[in-house]
Image (tube, grey):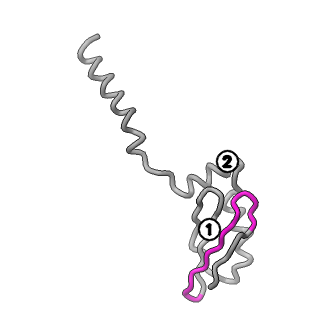
């Protein structure tokens, strides 16, 4: 085996070994999309449509996702409101007091 070929193989092997360490962790949106695609969670737009009617004019700031719960963040009159929703069923699990 030529020296060039050995160097190329070593570089390729080193790149394959270090690439997982350099990968960025998945974002909440990516994890939520994967869970919805696999049938473990409802799509975020469906969850948002279920929750919005109960929020009485609060401004929606965005979601978080931890694997089995969507946490939607709202603000009303300067106070933050968190709504926890079961990702699989869409059932509201809890709501912080405004």
Q: Is residue 75 above or below residue 2?
A: below
Outermost residue on the bottom side: it is 77
For the residues labelled 2 and 1, the Cα–Cα distance comes to 19 Å
Q: Is 67 drawn above or below residue 53 in the view shown?
A: above
In the picture, measured across the screen, residue 55 lies left or right of residue 23, that is: right
Crowd tier of the residue under label 1, counting other residues whose Cα lies within 10 Å: few below 14, some 14–19, many 20 or above? many
Q: Nearer the viewer, mark 2 or mark 1?
A: 1
Can you give x and y, in whole percent of width and height, for residue 85 in the image? Answer: 69, 66
Query: Which residue: 58% across, 89% down?
Result: 77
Residue at 71% from the left image edge and 57% from the top image edge: 42
Q: Residue furthest left?
A: 3
Disc 2 vs disc 1: Cβ atoms closer than 8 Å?
no
- Which residues fall within the magenta stretch? 77-91
Image disc number at residue 71: 1
Quarter of the picture containing the C terminus is bottom right
Q: Which residue is mark 2?
A: 37
Q: Horizontal and vertical percent for residue 54?
A: 73, 78
At 65% across and 58% down in the image, what residue appears?
Answer: 68
Task: Please tell me whether residue 4 is drawn above or below residue 64 in the rendered image.
Answer: above
Where disc 1 sits, the SS reads strand
Mark 2: secondary structure: helix
Residue 86 horizontal/vertical position (percent): 70, 63
Q: Is residue 80 magenta?
A: yes
Residue drawn at (68%, 46%) of the image = 38
């Amino acid at each position: 085996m030529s020296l060039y070929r050995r160097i190329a193989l070593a570089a390729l092997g080193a790149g394959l070994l270090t690439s997982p360490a350099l990968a960025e962790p998945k974002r909440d949106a990516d994890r939520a999309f994967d869970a919805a695609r696999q049938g473990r969670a409802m799509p975020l737009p469906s969850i948002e449509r279920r929750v919005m009617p109960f929020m009485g004019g609060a401004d929606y700031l965005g979601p978080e996702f931890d694997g089995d719960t969507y946490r939607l963040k709202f603000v009303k009159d300067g106070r933050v409101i968190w709504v926890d929703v079961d990702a699989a069923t869409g059932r509201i699990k809890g709501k912080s007091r405004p």
